[in-house]
Amino acid sequence: MLILDFDGVIADAFTECAVVTHYADHDPATVAAKPIAELAAAMPAGFVSRFRTVRTYARLLDDFMVARDPAADSIRGVQDFEALAARIPGPRMDALVRGATAVRAALRERRRTEWLDLHTLYPGIAGLLRRHSGRGTSIVTAKDERSVWEILAHHGLDVTVAQVVGECSDKRTVVRRIAAADGLPPEAVTFIDDHITNALAVRDTGATSLWAWWGYHTPEHVERAIARRQRRVYLPELAELTA
């Protein structure tokens, strides 16, 4: 059984994620009235630079919101990132996440082609999904389920995936649940994620957990992976994966 993360493993959506984060406190209809290229071009260079840094630490949509804080320019490690995330008040964070989700939905509906084109597949991913079609491949991701299905369909890959579990913050529990639903132990699962925290958490279930080297990570993530002897997987190796 193959279980994959989405952003950073199947597709790269840096600009889309930056846009929904930057406009999270704007009216979704007003945002979607403009071409996405115009929205992206209007983002301040400083925000884009901060988002590029924050993206390497983020696991959830909530985490992206740290890039809205100018202090994110000074992030030098996980502790800095976590400290900035912790100082966003809970109600404010909830409002920003709802806003970003609403902006994403508005762009998906009103700027559909532009929005879909912002999600580019990593090399070899389409072939991997097609080879495993019919074997119960699942996607477990922080992105919302509807967006994932629509992006997969855009690339002709929706028929290769059995299920999508979206807006997931606890991948270890979900991997166990998916395996159990098919009467399988976690050891029967091959899991791929680009965030070291997820890779290590799922590895502790007994699954074969692979850290996607082509995704987003930091030097501290590399150190942590080495210390825990976490196995990496590289894009050329995808052709050799069998579940």
Image (spheres, rainbow, N blue to C red):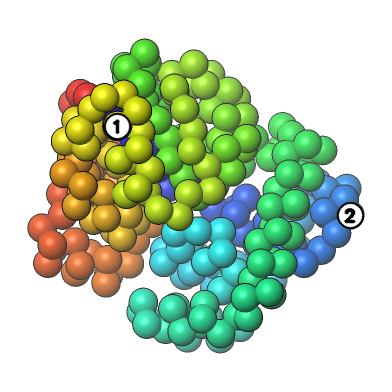
Tell me the kind of residue under disc 2.
Answer: Thr
Between residue 231 and residue 127, name the one nearer to us.
Answer: 231
Snapshot quadrant of residue 114: top right
The residue drawn where x is 62% and y is 29% is 150
The residue drawn where x is 82% and y is 38% is 110
Above or below for 38 versus 9: below
| 43 horizontally vs 199: left or right | right
Between residue 205 and residue 231, name the one nearer to us.
Answer: 205
Q: Answer yes or no: do the residues labelled 2 and 1 have beta carbons within 8 Å? A: no
Above or below for 221 versus 16: below
Residue denoted by label 1: 179
Kind of element beneath mark 1:
helix
Tell me the kind of residue under disc 1.
Answer: Ala
The residue drawn where x is 30% and y is 40% is 176
Snapshot quadrant of residue 175: top left
Total number of numbered labels? 2
As drawn, the label of residue 30 is: 2
Q: Quadrant of the C terminus?
A: top left
